[in-house]
Image (cartoon, rainbow, N blue to C red):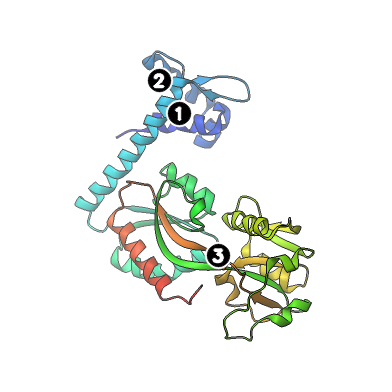
Amino acid sequence: MDTKQIEYILKIAEENNITKAAEKLFITQSALNQQLLKLEKELGTPLFHRSRTNWRLTEAGEIYIEGAKAALQIKNTTYNRIYDVVSARKGHLTIGLTPGRGLRMFTAIYPELHRSFPNLDVRPIEMRVRAQQDAIAKGEIDVGLMTLAQRDQTSDTYYPLKREELVLIIPTGHPLAEKAAPSGEPLATLDLAELRYEPFVLMDKTSTLRSSCDLLFEKAGFVPNILFETNNTSGIAAMVQSTLCCGIIPRYYTLGLTEGVACFSLPERPSWEIVISCQKNGYLNSGAREFIRLAREYWENSAPLF
């Protein structure tokens, strides 16, 4: 099933520019333009409103793109089902993994996955959550390990693995740190409003953690003084340890913190979920189903995060 032309048109629509699309596809702009003109002649109508800097879909183009995405999904589903039938324990599995914990989970469960499916072509890709959601929608990855609140979920399918608390962390030198519970005991509670005048380090605005944090500050009734934005959760803990600021991080990243940081629950005990996601109504081959089973087992046996 040759879908090369479909993939070409989808890339032009994605980039809104034929020059950029050709660069991403590693073909000449002339060759790509010929493919587009050939299709438009066949359909009897243009698919794009053309300009030097911005190509926009026509009404016919919108219809074509909708059908093109559905066609690629049918292709992927068909091929995966055939691989399952005629190539026992073979096939392909592309996995999106969140930075940090995603790679650690994959490292832990891959040996068992490989033993069960030695001929499975597994391709892990480290990606942030919103990039994974986009890649799943486009059929570029089969499954993705994500951390997000329910409000950040798309219309795709989500398999919950573990619920995780979002925890407030402050330097141990801060006057409020004396309210922290002793090591090994449940976390003490601290109202976020008590830190309204303190600087914070937060994840950048494209992060699902940041969207959860923004909602917490809104409920607390103040706009935080943001000292620094990062794309690394571990970096938040490191800056708090350096006594520069306060932060909010998932409970998972507090488990190894032994010095320099005092951890607190927030009164509302905010949380999100660790999940595996895939396309709604998409077909999961036997390798993907085994990956999900192993991931569930991994998180069931991990330390409590709430």
Q: Amino acid at mark 3?
A: Gly
Quadrant in the rendering for residue 158:
bottom left
Quadrant in the rendering for residue 44:
top left
Q: Amino acid at mark 1?
A: Ile
Residue 259: where, in percent of width, then height? 69, 81
Q: Residue at x 49, y 20 (%)?
A: 58
Q: Residue at x 41, y 48 (%)?
A: 156
Residue 114: where, in percent of width, then height? 34, 66
Q: Residue at x 73, y 79 (%)?
A: 177
Quadrant in the rendering for residue 118:
bottom left
Nearer mark to the viewer, of 3 and 2: 3
Residue 9: numbered disc: 1
Q: Residue at x 31, y 39 (%)?
A: 75
Instruction: Tell me which numbered mark, 1 or 3, is placed earlier along the sequence.
Output: 1
Q: Which residue is mark 3?
A: 100
Q: Is residue 63 visible?
A: yes
Q: Which residue is mark 2?
A: 39
Closest to the observer, 237 or 250: 250
Q: Is residue 35 visible?
A: no
Q: Amino acid at mark 2?
A: Leu
Residue at the left extreme of this rendering: 86
Closest to the observer, 302 or 89: 302
* Secondary structure of residue under mark 2: helix
* Secondary structure of residue under mark 3: loop
Instruction: Tell me which numbered mark, 3 or 2, is placed earlier along the sequence.
Output: 2
* Spatial CA span between label 1 and label 3: 35 Å
User: Does the residue at mark 2 contact the one at mark 1 (Cβ under 8 Å)?
Assistant: yes
* Spatial CA span between label 2 and label 1: 9 Å
